[in-house]
Every structure is written in structure tokens, then in C-alpha cells.
Amino acid sequence: MTDPAEVLRLDRITKRFGALVANDAISLRLRAGEVVALLGENGAGKTTLMNILFGQYVADEGQITAFGRALPPGNPRAALNAGIGMVHQHFTLADQLTVLENILLGTRGLWSWSMDIAAARAKVMALAGRFGLSVDPDARVGRLSVGERQRVEILKALYRDARVLILDEPTAVLTPQEAEALFDTLRKMVAEGLAVIFISHKLNEVMAIADRCLVLRHGRMAGEVETRDTSPAQLAAMMVGAEVTRPQIAAGQAGRALLQLDRVTTPDREGAPGLKAASLALHAGQITGIAGVSGNGQAALSDILSGLLSPASGRLLIEGQPAPDRWTPAAALASGLGRIPEDRHKTGTIADFTLTENAVLETHVRPPFSRGGWMDWAAAAAHTRDIIEKYDVRCPGPDARIRLLSGGNMQKLILGRVLEAGPSVILANQPVRGLDIGAIAYVHGQLLAARDRGAAVILISEDLDEVMQLSDVIHVISEGRLSPPIPRGTASVADLGLWMAGEGFPHAA
Amino acid sequence: MRLEPIANPGPARIYGLPALALGATVLVASVLALIAGANPFATLGLIVKGAFGSKFATLETLNRATPLIFTGLAVAVAFRAKLWNIGAEAQLYAGAVMTVLIGMHSWGAPWLQLPVMAALSIAAGALVLLGPVLLKTRFGVDEVVTTLLFNFIMLLFVSYLVEGPLKDPAGMGWPKSVPVAADLRLPRIAQGLRLHWGFALALISALLIWVIQTRTVLGYQIRAVGQNPQAARFAGIPVNAVLVKTALISGGLAALAGFSEVAGLKGHLSRDLSPGFGYTGIIVAMVALLHPLGVVLTALFVAGIFVGADSMSRAAGVPTYIADILMAVALLFMVLAILLTRYRVVWR
């Protein structure tokens, strides 16, 4: 019965949180030398499954076997000791230490430090060479690019003799070129008999790298297919439970400029670049896409448009007029901006507030939701019921706390809150991150509808496919600089990739 | 042993655990009584009897609860906004000082001068909290430290006043202030009842705070700022302004405790005006889960234990320290209960 090549086996793992079944009898088999993709929307149970594997949670039922031995549940060290390594979406590196120090951190006792640093260095260099993970072992991690840091994380796992590597959304932070290099590394690893679990929502990547796909939906196994026997459309259908129709996207009819940035500069902060003399114009009836690798000034751009940040130099014009001097979120709202923030959990909503309380967060100071300092909760609840119905928010009702909603339904409520205020300019920052395909199609459809009603939409996304699919005009952002506008259909992925890598800008910053 | 978050705790947890916490507190009290060599049931019975067993005892408990309702409300309002006001004691004394300053000479009709005394007391308490809050919003100074230190500054200031400028010449050398004019004492609620209008004012304040929290824009904004300042700021709520308003309300409420103790009960200012009402207010607010009406009930409970323990001690010989221990134990159990409504413990 046991396959000698089998390195990891999850058997009917079930995990319940109260009434919610996060994992319902999930089974997974991983053999040496293969890449298995774990596909599914946020909330489908991927993270829970991995947390069980790494001992963060204890499964209610089921068992885990690694290299033929049962893993004791609830012990975070067991998986590591068994040779399973994980590269998290958010890196776990110490910025102040060098690459080598980061790799060695935690691998030996406190008092044996510096004993065989030369041997360790040789091992790291050998691994780096073998798998194409070029990185300077003496560089401080704080100075490395995101792609390099990811390589350090992978090296860290390999140095601990990991035979199974789990990568959580590894390409979210990479340029297309860097992603391709990562895939080369993964191919070398499986050629040497390592096994990889690749967690992603990006169907094209899964098709490119995985041998087999395990699709999760609502905590259940929606299917397991060999990649060569499937298509992106079939995978998408499995993820959402129905065939998804991509919206047919016609070009927008560009009107006048509703918002302009004129050579706007903002200070750098916390390692992320500010804007560097960035100019753009958002036109009525158009979607302007901002493509780029994360951490290249998107946060500063988004903060300016949200009212959280004022330009240090340069001008912000709204309908041709300078923006109010006191540029605050309230001023932005009053100027007709609608904002869909990047982080719907931390910025977009208040977890322990009800749907109603969240729905009027931006409008509660105005009638009909309040008069003379008194809230009108009946009016707020009625408005929330409208949003729930119109935007198909699946929820127990307007009095439920929003933390109970899935990411997609939370985003629909935010979408309703923003769009029902009738904004003339809409900022959509990573509006579909972590959503299932059905919710993605819905959000995109709503943004297109708003565009067709004459709103100027700006879409900031790290997903190049999304930007290219929706945008009438694209700007690439790189180290705080904005490329000139690139009209729809005039640039290839490779062209945009060059801009993203910082090439083509008149002078380096 | 680890904690796992509970997505949606049921009513059994939300109401059952705090009840269990109170039960456990009683259990600890019984054990303590046993150690002191007394019959636990008799001891608990004596505490209850001492607190609510007679009209006199009940009124004594209500009088004792009055400042605790004010300081409990002050803390509850501030903690809702995650403004950690540990300085209710200082704000209480600020109110007490202002009450004496305005009330030592009678210059107008009581119906005019009493409200002025109350209003200026509120202003004094609000002002004392305003400083730490502005330091927090402008420079990010931790308000836990500044409000706590203000307690000691204020107490020293009161010492100076009662030994110096406000010293009562007729006080036989005791460090106490000149008294509040006789016609400016808070009247009793009914003839012959040893209960002053401060208690009614406390109940009205609790109702008012409840209405503010649930029905007004400010209350909604205070909750938003407390739960998630980042989201509140993004949504256009002026976070710093809300914190300042919260501080004014909180400081004012604590000051009313000082006003009501001086004008309603003691009649003068002294260093021992408050046996830590400002600190006990923190316990009251936490055990009440920051609910304004819960503060009233908890304050009655706490006052009952203190008053009851006094009388029990005389009868059963168990030291009154049992009251302090009970307070601490009740707080610990309640904090644990709050934690366990949101997390479950997983052994292994």
C-alpha cells in the first residue's frame, strides 16, 4: 500500500472552528520529485491545512505521515525536523543580520555559534549554486530586494535539509522575470527529488509549474487533477463550483480629467519609496491601471488618493482645481473620491462592528444617517439592507458582526459602501486580492459598470493579468516613478516587465 | 497549552463565564474565611447582611457606590476608545479641589452656585486629563505613564493645599480644608435618609453615557477609534479629536466623584478623601465589561463588599482585608472570563 516515493501524506484531515468546518476530510499525497499545487480562494482552508501540518492547530480528525512516520499533532518542531520547510508569504527574516546569519539562525545551540561557520558557508554556497539561488551570503538582509529575500527563505529551508518545500503565494511579490527564475529553481529542486507544495490562486502559474492540482472549496476537496489533463477554465470552475464567464471588456469612453497628479513627490518611509515626481491624469469613463511589483510606491500613491498623505511637492488637482489645503480622508470623501483600501480587514472594516456600523463608517456624519449629532440607526440599517441585496452580500443580516463574513462578502460590502456614495473618482487598491474567482468577476464587473457610468477608476494591482485585462490605460510604477501612460493593447507583458524592473525611465533615482 | 480563537462565541460563553467568575470569587472568599477560622457561610452571610441587611446598611452601600460609579464610568468611557486613563484618582481630586474653591464662600443662590460648582469641577477634571491626551496625540507619549504619574502630583498638590492656602483654621491642626458653605452641600434625596443627590447624579450620568455610546455620532466614533483607529482614520473620522473629546468626558466624570464626595458627604477636602476610588474604578469598569449600566451594578457590588466586610469583620473577626482580596480576585477572574469568551484553551 505504501508508495516508497511518498514523502508526505495527509489523511482525511478535518478541523472545525465551532460551526465552521475549515477542513473537511482533506487528503493529500506528495511524492518525491513532484510539484503539487494547492488551489483555492481565501477561506477555502489552505492556510488552516498548512497550520495543521506545522502544528499550529491540532486537527479534530485525520493524521499526517511524513516519510513513513506519523507526525505528532500540535508540535511545530515536528514538521521541521521531519524535513518539511515553508516559505511564508510574509518573510520571517531579521533585517539586521546577514544572509548567512539568517540561514544559521536557530539551527544550533546558543553556545556553539561560530564553531563551523566556514563549513556552513560552503554548504550554503553549494546549495545556492545547485539550485540557481544566487545571493551574497554576507549582504545584510535589510538591503536585499524582495526576490532576493525569497531566495534566502528558500535557502534557509534547504539548509535545514528540507525534502519538502511549501511555498505560500510565492509569486505575489515578484516581477514576471523573477517569477520565471523561481520556477527554474523549483524545476531544479524536483529534478533532484525534492517535493514542492505550491499554494496559489494564479491559474496560469499553476498550469506552468505543477504536476498535480488539489483544489479546495469551502473547506472541502473540490477535486484533484493532473495538470496535463486540465485547463485553467476547468480549474477555475472547480474553485468556484461553476463555470465562470469572464466579463467581455470593451474599451471605456475617455472623458475629461477628473483627478490629476502633477509631478507629485512624497517622502520615503519605512523602507518603501515615496512617489518621485509622479504625474498622471484620471479620466472620466476610464480605468487607469497601475502595474508594478509591490513596495514600489503603490502605498504612497494610494495614501495620496485616500487623503492620508499630502504631496511634499507637486500638485494634486481635482476637476482641474487644487485639492483642499487640509487634505484628509474626510476631505477626499467630500471631493468625491471613493476608496477601496488594500487591506479590507485592517483598513476597510472594523472587525467587531456590525455590517450596518461598517456600512456607514464613511457617511455617518451626514443625513439620513445622523442629524444634529444623533445617529439614525434605522436609516443606517435600511441602507445596509439595500447594499446587502444590491451587491449580493451573503451574510446573516445587517446586525451580524463583519468578522464572520468571508473576504469576498466583506469586499462586496465595502464596494457597496463606496459605490452607493456616488464617487466621481474610485481608487481600487488590490480590490480582488485573496478573493475567489466568482467574487473577482463580480468586483471587476462593478468597477467596469462604475467606469461606464462616467467615473474615473484607478486600479492598483500586483497582478499584471488583472491590470492588463481591465485597464484602458496603464502606468507602471517602479521605485516611486510612474511610467508615461501606456494605452490598452500597445504593450506586451515583457514590455511592462521591463518598466517594472526600472528600465526605460529617463534617469535613475 | 495554547489558545485558539473562537470565531463566534455563543451566549453560554458570553454570559456564563462572567457569572462563573463571580461564583469562583465567592468560592475563594469562602476558603479565605475558612483559613481565618470562621464559618464561610456565616462570613458571606454577614457580608451580605452588612451591605444590604438594613436600611442604614443599604444607604451606606449606596453612598459608598456613588464615587465608584463616577470613576467606573470615567474609566469605562476612556477604555472604550482604548484611551488608558489610569488617572481617575487625580481627576477626582481636581474636581474636589474646584468644589472647595467655588463652594467655600456662598455668593449666590444654591440653585445657581451648585451647578456652577459641578460644571467647574467637571472642567477641572477634564483639564487634568487633557494634558496627557494632548501629549499622546501630538508626541505619542504613553498615557498610561502620564495619567498614572498625575495621581501622585495631584495628591501632593492637595497636601500642599490642605496644609497651606486652604487649611481650615478651625481644624484643630488636622490637614483638612476649609469647609464648603452649609447651603452649598448636596441635599439629601429624602428627609431623614442619609443619601445625597450625588447618587442620583451618578445614575443619571450612567444613563447619559449609555445613550451617548449607543445613540450619538460621538459614541459611535469613540467605539470605532477604540476598535480600529486605522480604519476609523481611513473612513474620515478625526481620531485625535475623538480622543480629546473622550478625555474631556472621562476626566469630567471622575471629577464628579470628587464633587459629590466633598459637596455631598465630607464637606471638606482632605488627603484621605478617596481611598483609591480612582483605581477601584478601573476594576469596576473592567468587571462591568465597560458597559455604563454594568458599571452601576458592579459599583454596587463592590461597595457592598467593602461595607459588608467592615461590618462582618466586627462580628466574625475576619480581617477586612478580605474585601481587598475579593476585589483583586474578582478582577482576575473577570479578565480571565473575558479572555475565555474569545479563546478556547487547547491542551497538548
Image: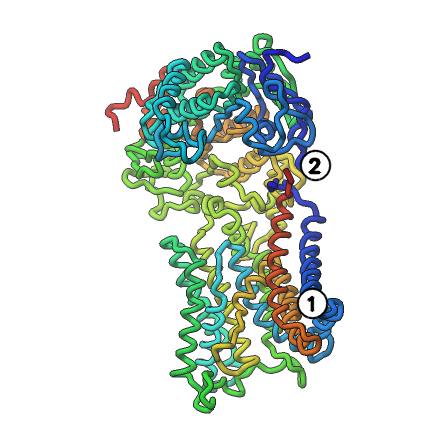
Q: Is residue A182 above or below residue A140?
A: above
Disc 2, SS: loop
Q: Nearer the viewer, residue B23 or A22?
A: B23
Residue B226 in the image: state x and y as whole percent: 51, 51
Which chain's residue wears label 2? A
Q: Is residue B182 above or below residue A459?
A: below
What amino acid type is highlighted by mark number 1? Answer: Ala
Task: Work out which quarter of the rendered image holds the C terminus of chain A and state it.
Answer: top left
Residue B9 in the image: state x and y as whole percent: 67, 45
Which chain's residue wears label 1? B
Q: Nearer the viewer, residue A354 or A270?
A: A270
Q: Quadrant of residue B2?
A: top right
What amino acid type is highlighted by mark number 2? Answer: Ala
Q: Nearer the viewer, residue B280 or A432?
A: B280
- Can the viewer see residue A366 in this picture? no
Task: Work out which quarter of the rendered image holds the N terminus of chain A and state it.
Answer: top right
Tell me the residue at 47%/77% (across/down).
Answer: B271
Q: Is residue A103 above or below residue B292?
A: above
What residue is shown with label 1? B33
Residue B316 in the image: state x and y as whole percent: 70, 75
Residue B55 in the image: state x and y as whole percent: 72, 79
Instruction: Give the side of residue B53 with respect to residue B184, left or right.
Output: right
What residue is shown with label 2? A19
Give neighbour class at mark 2: few <14, some 14-19, many 20+ (Cα, 10 Å).
few
